């Protein structure tokens, strides 16, 4: 067992609400570790709409998801949050008051005084196309991500999709594959033009094939694929010989392990009170899209408010008996020192 | 008010009232129509509100925009009649619209 990281707070989810919670907790001297399943901060703002403008953030008439994320990271910076990306919190165990153990799928263990669940719609997971029988091949012939390129050396690979993941892995794996085919529903690609050009060069050089159509079925035995049935764009059916299939259909949000943590849930949301934004387990808070209370609005600005209020209660748990002095960043030298501006 | 009928994969039909200006996705969510997930809440960023527009309505709902075409790459079993229901604005012109919901948004 790896040694546990000891901390005041673990925030699950590095979306806008999780990032602002770092700031609010930081003002009260509460140190945070932040875990996210994505490879970067921003949550939905980073994954679903980095380039799309948001118009309802107070004082920012227009801001993109990526820009909002960067601003929140800048704002949280004085508090030195420690991020753990590409990690999903799989277990959350309460050992006692102000003593929680969290474990990630990457083997990181935390012991934390409080926990903030800011997991939005849940964890982003790869979309699994509903091709009949696909389950039987997962982990042996069907993969939704590439963890080790070597596993694909010398194989007959079919990649499905037209975005960056599909094109990047097509270009990266083509040189080590026995054969490489890219299948997409149209002859236009969302991926970066660079990657598309590279793919087309590989096709022109005879190093891979590009097919247009959609997967309809799989053939194989004992978890090993032998061919993939495709309906071509002209309506004609054909087979592609491959023993490795990588479908890249983007990510979707699933509640995931949160359901197993013994919290009261209401239709996949965590009911909280509106004073402390605390779940049914004292010391575990829930903010942002994942919580629910009468009148809840799933807006980023609601999550900001929730972060400020949960921090008050978090302070009381972490500093029992200590009086919490309410202060403004405009006038408090103490807060300004923490922010590094005084 | 415009009537919109959602036809499930198993053939069950549900007709809901759509207010002009709303999207077909919003009408589905408001009436808890199964099979319209709308993960992103209408930003044309997820393709989980995929529907098939019945042939006789295809012209009336109009064509896919480029952004929608891109997002449909994330849907499964895309057909000529495929649309993202968050991109179909309800108006009196589509009163009576019939759309099929895929078996799974996945």
Image (cartoon, rainbow, N blue to C red):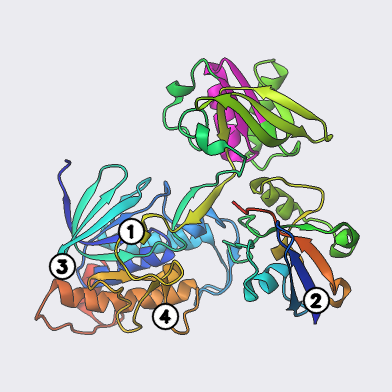
The residue indicated by pointer 3 is A98
Q: Are marks 2 and 3 on the same chain?
A: no
Chain of the residue under label 1: A
Which disc is residue A81 wearing? none
Which one is earlier in the sequence, the residue at label 1 or at label 4? 1
Q: Position of residue A295 (x, y in %)?
A: 47, 84
The residue indicated by pointer 1 is A260
Chain of the residue under label 4: A
Residue in view at x 21 percent, y 49 percent: A109
Q: Position of residue B84 (x, y in %)?
A: 71, 58
The residue indicated by pointer 2 is B3
Which one is earlier in the sequence, the residue at label 4 or at label 3? 3
Q: Quadrant of residue A105?
A: top left
Q: Secondary structure at mark 1?
A: helix
Identify the image quadrant of the C terminus of chain A: bottom left
Q: Residue A201, can we see it?
A: no
Q: CA distance from mark 1 to mark 4?
A: 21 Å
Q: Are marks 1 and 3 on the same chain?
A: yes
Q: Are marks 1 and 4 on the same chain?
A: yes
Query: Is residue A265 toward the left or the right of residue A96 in the image?
Result: right
The residue indicated by pointer 4 is A293
Q: Residue A113, can we see it?
A: yes
Q: Secondary structure at mark 3?
A: loop
* Residues packed near mark 3 inside 10 Å, few (<14), some (14 to 19) or many (20 plus): some
Q: Is residue A199 magenta?
A: no
Part of the protein shown in magenta: A156-182
Residue in view at x 59 percent, y 35 percent: A166
Can you tell which of label 2 and label 3 is closer to the viewer?
Answer: 2
Task: Reply above or below: B3 against B36.
Answer: below
């Amino acid at each position: 067992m790896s040694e546990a990281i000891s901390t005041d707070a673990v925030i699950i989810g590095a979306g806008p609400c999780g990032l602002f919670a770092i700031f609010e907790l930081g003002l009260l001297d509460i140190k945070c570790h932040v875990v996210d399943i994505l490879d970067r901060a921003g949550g939905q703002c980073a994954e679903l709409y980095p380039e799309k403008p948001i118009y309802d953030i107070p004082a920012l008439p227009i801001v993109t998801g990526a820009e909002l994320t960067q601003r929140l990271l800048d704002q949280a910076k004085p508090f030195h949050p420690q991020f753990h990306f590409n990690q999903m919190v799989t277990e959350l165990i309460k050992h006692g008051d102000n003593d929680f153990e969290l474990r990630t799928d990457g083997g990181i263990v935390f012991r934390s005084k409080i926990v903030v669940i800011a997991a939005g719609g849940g964890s982003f997971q790869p979309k699994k196309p509903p091709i009949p029988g696909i389950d039987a091949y997962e982990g042996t012939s069907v993969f939704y991500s590439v963890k080790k390129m070597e596993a694909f050396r010398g194989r007959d690979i079919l990649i499905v999709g037209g975005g960056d993941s599909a094109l990047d892995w097509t270009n990266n794996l083509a040189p080590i594959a026995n054969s490489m085919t890219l299948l997409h529903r149209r002859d236009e690609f969302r991926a970066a033009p660079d990657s598309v050009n590279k793919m087309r060069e590989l096709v022109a050089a005879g190093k891979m094939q590009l097919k247009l159509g959609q997967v309809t079925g799989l053939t194989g035995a004992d978890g090993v694929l032998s061919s993939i049935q495709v309906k071509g764009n002209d309506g004609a059916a054909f087979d592609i010989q491959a023993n490795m299939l990588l479908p890249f259909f983007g990510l979707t949000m699933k509640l995931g392990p949160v359901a197993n943590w013994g919290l009261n849930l209401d239709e996949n949301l965590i009911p909280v009170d509106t004073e402390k934004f605390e779940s049914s387990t004292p010391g575990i808070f829930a903010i942002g899209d994942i919580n629910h209370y009468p009148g809840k609005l799933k807006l980023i600005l609601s999550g900001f408010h929730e972060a400020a209020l949960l921090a008050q209660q978090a302070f009381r748990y972490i500093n029992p008996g200590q009086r919490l002095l309410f202060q403004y960043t405009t006038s408090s030298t103490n807060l300004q020192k923490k922010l590094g501006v005084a | 008010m415009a009537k919109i009928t959602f036809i499930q994969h198993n053939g069950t039909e549900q007709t809901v009232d759509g207010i002009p200006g709303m999207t077909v996705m919003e009408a589905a969510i408001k009436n808890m129509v199964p099979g319209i997930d709308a993960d992103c809440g209408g930003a044309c960023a997820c393709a989980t509100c995929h529907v098939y527009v019945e042939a006789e309505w295809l012209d009336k709902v109009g064509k896919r925009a480029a952004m929608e075409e891109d997002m449909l790459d994330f849907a499964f079993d895309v057909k000529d009649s495929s649309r993202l229901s968050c991109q179909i604005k309800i108006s009196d012109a589509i009163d009576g619209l019939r759309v099929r919901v895929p078996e799974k948004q996945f």
